[in-house]
Image (cartoon, rainbow, N blue to C red):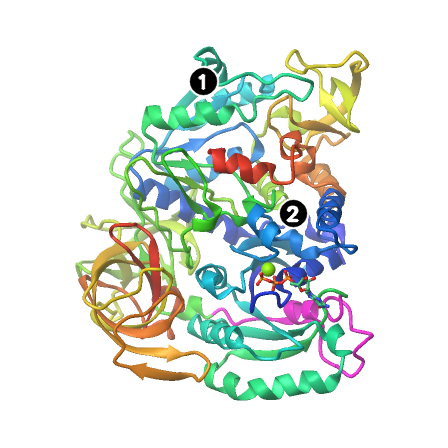
Amino acid sequence: MNKLNDKIGHFPRQLEDESIYIMREVAAQFERPALLFSGGKDSITLVRLAQKAFYPGKIPFPLVHIDTGHNFPETIEFRDWLAKETGAELIVRYVQDSIDQGKAKEESGKYASRNVLQTVTLLDTIEEFKFDACIGGARRDEEKARAKERIFSVRDDFGQWDAKRQRPELFDMLNGRIAVGENVRVFPISNWTELDVWNYIKEENMEIPSIYFSHKRQVIERDGMLWADSEHLNKEADEIPFEATVRFRTVGDMTCTAAVASEATEIDVIIEEILSAEISERGARIDDKRSEAAMEKRKQQGYF
Amino acid sequence: MDILRIATAGSVDDGKSTLIGRLLYETNSITKDKIEALESASKRKGLDFLDLSLLTDGLIAEREQGITIDVAHIYFSTPSRKYIIADTPGHVEYTRNMVTGASNAKVSLILVDARQGMVEQTARHLSIAAMLRIPKVIICVNKMDLVQYQESTFEEIKASLTELVKQTTFEGQEISFLPISSLYGQNITTKAEQMPWFTGNTLLGELEAFEYAETLAHAPARFPVQFVVRPMTEAYHDFRGYAGKISSGTFQVGDAIRVLPTGQESTIATIEKFESKLSHAKAGDSVVITLSTDIDISRGNTIVLASEANAPQLKDFSAQVCWLDHQALTPGKTYLLQHGINITKAKISQITERLDVVAQTATEGVDSLKLNEIGRIALRTAQPISADVYANNPSNGAFILIDEFSNSTVGVGFVQ
Ligand SMILES: Nc1nc2c(ncn2[C@@H]2O[C@H](COP(=O)(O)OP(=O)(O)OP(=O)(O)O)[C@@H](O)[C@H]2O)c(=O)[nH]1
Ligand SMILES: [Mg+2]
């Protein structure tokens, strides 16, 4: 019944209307909102939606990037280009600074990454700018703990998510009232799937970082997956880099996002690959594989 | 491509999560890595079969206790539509999460355990489906495998529910009955070879065939103003647009409009969606509207057609409510009432009755409504609200009540 070509290129427009409505609620209900920008396709989609929501006005909140120092250079380049293109304010804070200040400790071993560490920098940034709402590109179809999220997700002073005490969220009525010190994480594309995002990018003719398309790069093979070789990756003696033709399906840090072998240089081919993929998007994220409840635990700590 | 939103309902352990897991499994919507994760989680629980309820029961506490605590949203699509499923908890304590999941649904799947037949939750959830005016309810008699797939059991349960169903449904609500086994995949996407006596559609078949008449576009035009767009740039120096999502009806360029509650009038100059200018827009569209004259409009105002002489302005009214908080609703207390995007203070003057969901009878003269109870209240707001009677225009007839001190959403109401 899942006939491939039937599904290609159909983006349910209703989703866009709903997300724009959420963006406008954020701008209206909060004093100091921010859009957490990672450089990945989901946050690029958020920027597009924010642009549409306030047009012909500018996006009324800053884009905030927590730079782990392990980002793909293409992502950083794209981030700067997009901020310029949209005229949005860009705020960058560095995980390296949190490490230098002794607030976060670099992990060791071959799976070392800065994924967990970025929460420290994020919480500090929220405090520094007194952000009361942070818009994120998480989608409920990504992961089982995310499937439980509200659109407006209230976090306490420590940024923690309490899954057992979520507010009822009825119809499209969003209650963003909070006490001093609390903040809200907002997920405007909660109800989009990976496929919806790609179909949207296609229909909107959006620019995305080049690493989403097939290219040649030095990789190593680990646990049956391909990893971009970089100075940040702790390689073992037998992990020898070789050149491969790959693309990335999801973009996080270089240390925790695996590449997929692919010749896809066009978006239609990417969509076809996703439709026939046997592995889910987060299957290429080592940060989720640490334990069965890795995501829920990180969210309790304030991860976005 | 359209979207169909579905929510599960029914008592704890009736098999809601298993059913949704099965539906996704049989439509090839679960990727290999997720199936492997389910296999190993099932094994860790000491099960010798694939426990598909683990697909939606993703929280640590849920997996420990084997129950659903909060709503999970899960997605799949067929060539004809995208489905958004809210898998809700059956435990009475978490009814507020059930209501959260059900509030947007067009189809409610109410599960009944074939061994037990109707229980209190069946009645509560049928009442909630009616209160929300969910257009279609499929009562799924599950675990048919445990009653040897007997037709007589199915028919008995169906008969025992007839009276209740008669009392809860509203005109136009479709109710159907379906015998299934979620565990063994009987009547989910393929006809049950174990139940040749059942000649109806499978669950997926019913969902695919369901078309609901979208009445919202024909309801009276309502445009709540969310945000005033004032770029104040050189190119758009005098631009003043009103951004919002049309909640019902249709607006066209040139329409004469009135602003509530101020009563000022103007005409629509443009309807814009990003860079494109539209001739009209309908319910569900997020647009920016500009007017031909400069009038004072702010967030929370509602734009309606000037031709509608008596657009509603409510200050004293009655509503059906479902209470969602541990602290009971007590008359005399002031809450914040949020209708759509508009917030005003409201005082509950009286609880006129409480509904007994099983007997479907009302008790008058009650002095509180506790968590998960349904009743009727009389209330008075500080500012008038532009709400319609929920039954006539669901997209503009519901509100939530917020506790001023805890900031929690404590109740949901439906204007009567
Ligand atoms: N024999 C049999 N067992 C079933 C069937 N469907 C579900 N079960 C079992 O019933 C138990 C409860 O299933 P769940 O899917 O977790 O029930 P639920 O309705 O989601 O429960 P809550 O969400 O906690 O209200 C599990 O042990 C399932 O394996 C069925 O069709 N036949
Ligand atoms: Mg369940």
The chain containing the residue under callout 1 comes to A
Say which amino acid is labelled 2.
Answer: Gly
Secondary element under disc 2, as helix, strand or loop, is: loop
In the depicted structure, whether residue B129 falls above or below residue A154: below
Which labelled disc corresponds to residue A103? 1
Secondary element under disc 1, as helix, strand or loop, is: loop
The chain containing the residue under callout 2 comes to A
Q: Position of residue A242 (x, y in %)?
A: 80, 15
- Calculate the distance from the C-alpha at mark 1 to the C-alpha at mark 2: 46 Å
Read off the magenta span: B185-214
Which secondary structure type mostly characterizes the magenta part of the structure? loop
Is B112 covered by the magenta stretch? no
Residue under pointer 2:
A9
Q: Nearer the viewer, residue A35 or B234?
A: A35
**Image point 52% across, 83% down: which residue?**
B165
- Quadrant of the image containing the N terminus of chain B: bottom right
Q: Crowdedness of circle 1 by 10 Å Cα count: few (<14), some, many (20+)?
A: some
Q: Crowdedness of circle 2 by 10 Å Cα count: few (<14), some, many (20+)?
A: some
Q: Position of residue B114 (x, y in %)?
A: 67, 77
Asked if residue B398 shows in the view, the reply is yes
Same chain letter for marks 1 and 2: yes
In the depicted structure, whether residue B106 falls above or below residue A254: below
Is B203 covered by the magenta stretch? yes
Of callouts 1 and 2, the N-terminal one:
2
Q: Nearer the viewer, residue B250 or A104?
A: A104
Say which amino acid is labelled 1.
Answer: Lys
Splitting the image into 4 quarters, where does residue A72 fall? top right
**Image point 52% across, 23% down: which residue?**
A117
